[in-house]
Amino acid sequence: MFAGKLDSARCLVVKIGSALIADVDTGEVRSPWLENFIEDVVRCFARGQQVIIVTSGAVALGSRNYNRRDKGLRTEEKQTAAAIGQVRLMRAYEQALKRHGLGMGQVLLTNEDIEDQHRRLNVRSTLQQLLKIGAVPVVNENDTTATAETCLGDNDRLAAWIAELVSAEFLILLCNVDGLSTEDPHVNPLARLVTEVRCITPEIDAMAGHPVTHYSTGGMVTKLAAARIVMDAGSTMVIARGNKPHPLAAIENGGPSTWFLPR
Ligand code: GLU
């Protein structure tokens, strides 16, 4: 019912989960997926929209160096994996965008950059300048410098802060489920997809589960935290499945998704 609104937005922030961009078994970028997703981004640019990508995947792409992903990595190992994986991640985005004549700029942030007014304004100005010259900002947390005290911890909230900072009308979280369900759909196949949320009630909170992987920190809990930020800022957040062809077009065409509407 709301799907058509995406194409009229001035600015979209799109967050990519680790499982979409990274093949954790091989430590390689899922290039066919990325190339297909970038076609969606190019289509948005072609109709005059601004797109900011917030991407996870650095830790997942760098963690094969430790060869024990099943047990999870210690903090310093995650930071090292991110240092290695971030290069692979950015190279993949750069190449995919370049094929369509688009440039990109890497923006790495920590909590301190968001909390400090001066630094926050610098971030906004850089994002605006990148968009002005037709380069796609590609944002991630600076995992290598973030400590327990300064880390944002998850890119869902980072993406929400970015959306608020640039007054984007939409934040789209692409992940490996269709959206928020009444129960975990992996556990109960009868779980229903919630298509529209106008207020995050205790009942909605109760539907969120827990983070499930060692290489990413997201899950429905952080997605609801992101939704609160976006809804309070008067914008809309959409959660949808990313592992399908042209996931942004699928949302526009009314595909399964959960819409968190502004207050
Ligand atoms: N910044 C982490 C990475 O790039 C991911 C954080 C998250 O999963 O939200 O691997």
Image (cartoon, rainbow, N blue to C red):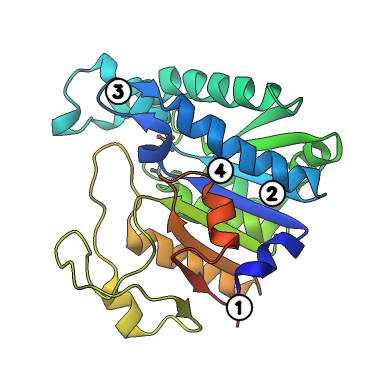
Q: Are marks 1 and 4 in contact (CB under 8 Å)?
A: no
| SS category of the residue bearing label 3 | helix
Q: Is residue 17 left or right of residue 12?
A: left
- Point out the tag, 4 or 2, that comes first from the N-terminus: 4
- Point out the tag, 1 or 4, that comes first from the N-terminus: 4
Residue hosting label 4: 54
Image vertical order of residue 84 relative to residue 9, above or below: above
The residue drawn where x is 60% and y is 74% is 2
| SS category of the residue bearing label 1 | loop
Cα distance between the residues tagged 3 and 2: 30 Å
- Tell me, yes or no, if residue 186 can be seen here: yes
Cα distance between the residues tagged 4 and 2: 16 Å
Residue hosting label 3: 63
Residue type for callout 3: Ser
Image quarter in which the N terminus is found: bottom right
| SS category of the residue bearing label 2 | helix
Q: Position of residue 64 (x, y in %)?
A: 27, 19
**CA neighbours of label 4 inside 10 A, class few (<14), some (14 to 19), many (20+):** many
- Point out the tag, 2 or 1, that comes first from the N-terminus: 2
Q: Are marks 3 and 1 in contact (CB under 8 Å)?
A: no
